[in-house]
Amino acid sequence: MNSWKWIWRTTAVSSAAATLLLAVGFGYGAKELVFPSANRIDTETSAKAPLAERTPSVEEGNYRIVSIGDSLAKGTGDTTGQGFARRTAALLDKKSEREVRFLNNLGINGMTTDELLQELEEPGIQYVLKQANVILLSVGANDLFRGGAALQAGTNNPSAAALAEALPAASNRLGEALDRLREINASAQIVYLGLYNPFGDIESLRQAGDEGIAEWNAKAAERIAKGQNMMLTPTFDLFQRNTAAYLSFDHFHPNSAGYQRIAERVVQGLE
């Protein structure tokens, strides 16, 4: 099996200034994650529509792609609006002879594992997911960094202790979400996006972030290995030494180049 499927200063004044700028940028992005603008689809209306009562169509031999989860699933930070999900579809369309259809982007800024579990009970959401044969999932970062109190306007840094406290319950909920996705769609390839550390270039935040995310990814990989037709796409290594090149101005989400690299990694796993 392709290994990509499982893997994963200047003067003191200028250094302090750079850290301050990063903190401000992070606080901006964090605010949107903790207090996101409403952008949910109207699932109540969808559930009442005749469409939601029909059996979803299944076209053999085609890629039918849906993304679901947090702001990375949505594509926040990508100036083109594509995110890794639509970029994945575009790459597959170039490289594969199979028809590629991007059905829907269900990503929501700030989504946690608990909110994802609630979302998966919506009939309209279930209808869309049932049509897919590739489900791209990104979730978990908001659980970890909320637990560390790091997303309160950038005033607190994530600590190893706080991340460790948040991790077990959130990891269990990720497992529940994967199980629920499999119940909703028995055969689709479920691609889970592993987490990366956006604080890797900030010395005071690097170790806590690395440790918490490494443990999260390890638990996710262990859980996914037990599932059927699931894979984890690692991203940690992509951003570990390339934060300046691959993060957007908020110093949290990927930029267009970062999303492109993620998409390339996803396609490697699907081929």
Image (cartoon, rainbow, N blue to C red):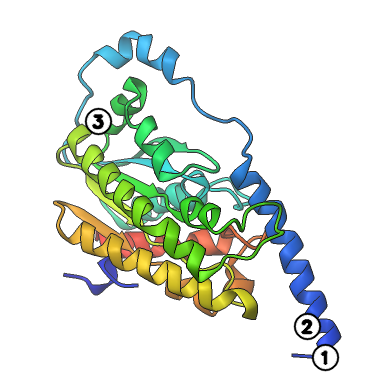
> Which residue is drawn at the image coordinates 32% and 46% (left, top)?
173
Q: Earlier in the sequence, mark 3 or mark 1?
A: 1
Q: Are marks 3 and 1 in contact (CB under 8 Å)?
A: no
Q: Is residue 116 left or right of residue 72?
A: left
For badge 2, the amino acid type reads Ser
Image quadrant containing the C terminus: bottom left
> Which residue is drawn at the image coordinates 29% and 51% (left, top)?
172
Question: Foreground: 232 or 152?
Answer: 152
Q: Earlier in the sequence, mark 2 or mark 3?
A: 2
Image mark for residue 11: 1
Alpha-carbon distance for marks 2 and 3? Answer: 50 Å
Image quadrant containing the N terminus: bottom left
For badge 3, the amino acid type reads Lys
> Which mark's residue is nearer the viewer, 3 or 1?
1
**Horizontal and vertical percent position of residue 204:** 64, 77
> Which mark's residue is nearer the viewer, 2 or 3?
2
> Which residue is drawn at the image coordinates 54% and 43% (left, top)?
110
**Horizontal and vertical percent position of residue 16:** 80, 79
Q: Secondary structure at mark 2?
A: helix
